[in-house]
Image: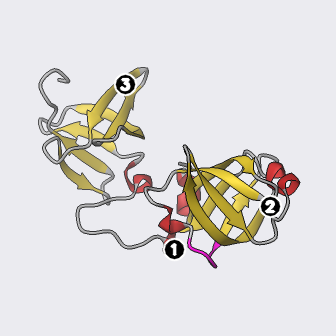
Amino acid sequence: MNSSSAKKGLILIGKIVGAHGVKGNCKIRSYAESLTVFQPGSEILISTSSGLKNVYEINWAKPHSKVDLLSLKGVTTRIQAQALIGSELFIEKAQLPELDDGSYYWYDLIGLEVFTTDNNYLGRLDSILQTGSNDVYVVKKGEDEILIPALESVVQAIDLEKKRMRVELPEGLE
């Protein structure tokens, strides 16, 4: 996710990867855990690869095969949907639901400096992989990369103000 967008109050939540059918529906790859962020009647900013930015109202969103489908007000033909392929989808940060204590949005975590409980610097949290059973944090330090499971037993503390994460590495990752 683009952290400069998050600072401006916008969150990258997906990308248009194709067109579906003849009525202007878009195939999207959602970066959100759930499609609830694509609320019917809410607005979404679409940024094309050429730099054009337009706000659309969401008609609906639903899962479909390996991607999700999104219907936008004003996009009513396949040709219009095809013109949006490759565009990124943003919503305002304020539209995101509040999280329970101890839960974080990915954009809050990416960029954190990661240390072991012994204060050994491991690197910067660069990205997060979804693996099914648990997420995996990709931490980079120069050319080195370490994959850290996002488990309560591993992640000991997260301090968003100090932009730090403390981890207890499992045996074999040390």
Among the two numbered marks 2 and 1 on one chain, the one whose residue lies closer to the N terminus: 2
Relative depth, front residue between 130 and 112: 130
Q: Contact, CB < 8 Å: mark 1 with mark 3?
A: no
Give the position of the C terminus as an image quadrant.
Answer: top left
For label 3, the crowd category at 10 Å Cα-Cα, with few meaning under 14, some 14 to 19 and many 20 or more, is some
Relative depth, front residue between 59 and 118: 59
* Residue highlighted by disc 2: 23
Q: Residue 64's x, y, as percent?
A: 57, 51
Nearest to viewer (mark 3 / mark 2): 2
Region rendered in magenta: 39-43
Q: Residue 146's x, y, as percent?
A: 32, 27
Q: Residue 126's x, y, as percent?
A: 43, 38
Q: Residue furthest bottom?
A: 41
* Residue highlighted by disc 1: 95
Nearest to viewer (mark 1 / mark 3): 1
* Residue highlighted by disc 3: 145
Q: CA distance from mark 2 to mark 1?
A: 27 Å
For label 2, the crowd category at 10 Å Cα-Cα, with few meaning under 14, some 14 to 19 and many 20 or more, is some
